[in-house]
Image: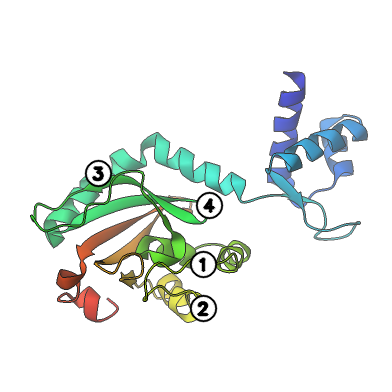
């Protein structure tokens, strides 16, 4: 238990001071440098932190990995995002007549955590818990657009599977496309990139602190999507 508590305290120090070196952590926590080093190595092995580079100097030291971001998004979803968003999803479904999805990011994928189905008998059924690649979904592109640059580049360079003839893989979703979503506030639009029979349009959802915690999309059968404004032009 003592070892686990020490590791958690060290993780908290890294989060507050990153990038930070072992000497600084040992001094702040009033513990032997060897103990601080063991805790750092344990956190590195479990994927929570990484080193920005060898040696000393500005910008060197230990920093959090994206695992912390993934956990934060899951926690946000678990403490009430679904409840808060449910009325909005329902209103959007009623306004569009189409199914509406709420998603969060986990790694290189989006995961559906809530759905409000259309009453239209012709629909695209995608169940809760479905995972899809970020680069092939409107919600994924909305999240990518507002992601910090090192992480976005890492994901786009990780290898993007082609799911349909319309899936954008090489080159990956363009900087111009993502910049327009991020800077101009436009919706992310996908036509047949995940499945040929699906079109979707999405926006990210921000917390009060400005962190993107999830995204909302309208999911539409392609033949109806092409008849809408979203199917013919960027909204």
Element type where label 2 sits in the image: loop
- Give the answer, above or below, for where 210 lies relative to 6: below
Sequence-earlier tag: 2 or 4: 4
Exactly how many numbered labels are in the figure? 4
Q: Which residue is mark 2?
A: 170
Would you call the spot at circle 1 few (<14 residues within 10 Å), some (14-19), or many (20 or more)? some
Q: Which residue is mark 3?
A: 86
Q: Residue furthest top?
A: 1
Residue 210 appears anywhere in the view: no
Q: Which residue does the image show at 26% across and 81% down from the upper left?
A: 233
Q: Which residue is mark 4?
A: 107
Query: Mark on residue 84?
Result: none
Quarter assignment of residue 202: bottom left
Q: Which residue is mark 1?
A: 160
Sequence-earlier tag: 1 or 4: 4
Would you call the spot at circle 2 few (<14 residues within 10 Å), some (14-19), or many (20 or more)? few
What is the spatial separation of the Cα atoms under label 1 and label 3, in whole angstroms? 32 Å
Report the quarter where the C terminus lies.
bottom left
What is the spatial separation of the Cα atoms under label 2 and label 4, in whole angstroms? 20 Å
């Amino acid at each position: 238990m003592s070892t686990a508590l020490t590791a958690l305290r060290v993780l908290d120090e890294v989060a507050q001071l990153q990038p930070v070196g072992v000497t600084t952590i040992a001094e702040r926590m009033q513990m032997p440098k060897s103990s601080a080093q063991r805790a750092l190595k344990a956190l590195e092995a479990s994927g929570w932190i990484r080193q920005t580079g060898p040696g000393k100097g500005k910008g060197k030291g230990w920093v959090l990995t994206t695992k912390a971001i993934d956990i934060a998004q899951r926690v946000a979803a678990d403490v009430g995002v679904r409840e808060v968003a449910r009325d909005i999803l329902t209103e959007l479904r009623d306004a569009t007549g189409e199914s509406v999805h709420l998603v969060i990011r986990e790694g290189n994928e989006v995961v559906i955590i809530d759905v409000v189905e259309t009453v239209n008998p012709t629909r695209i059924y995608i169940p809760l818990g479905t995972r899809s690649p970020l680069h092939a979904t409107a919600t994924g592109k909305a999240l990518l657009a507002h992601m910090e640059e090192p992480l976005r580049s890492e994901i786009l360079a990780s290898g993007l599977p082609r799911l349909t003839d319309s899936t954008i893989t090489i080159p990956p979703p363009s900087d111009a496309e993502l910049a327009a979503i991020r800077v101009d506030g436009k919706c992310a639009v996908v036509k047949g990139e995940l499945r040929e029979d699906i079109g979707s349009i999405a926006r990210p959802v921000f917390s009060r602190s400005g962190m993107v915690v999830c995204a909302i999309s309208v999911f539409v059968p392609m033949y109806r999507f092409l008849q809408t404004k979203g199917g013919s032009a960027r909204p």
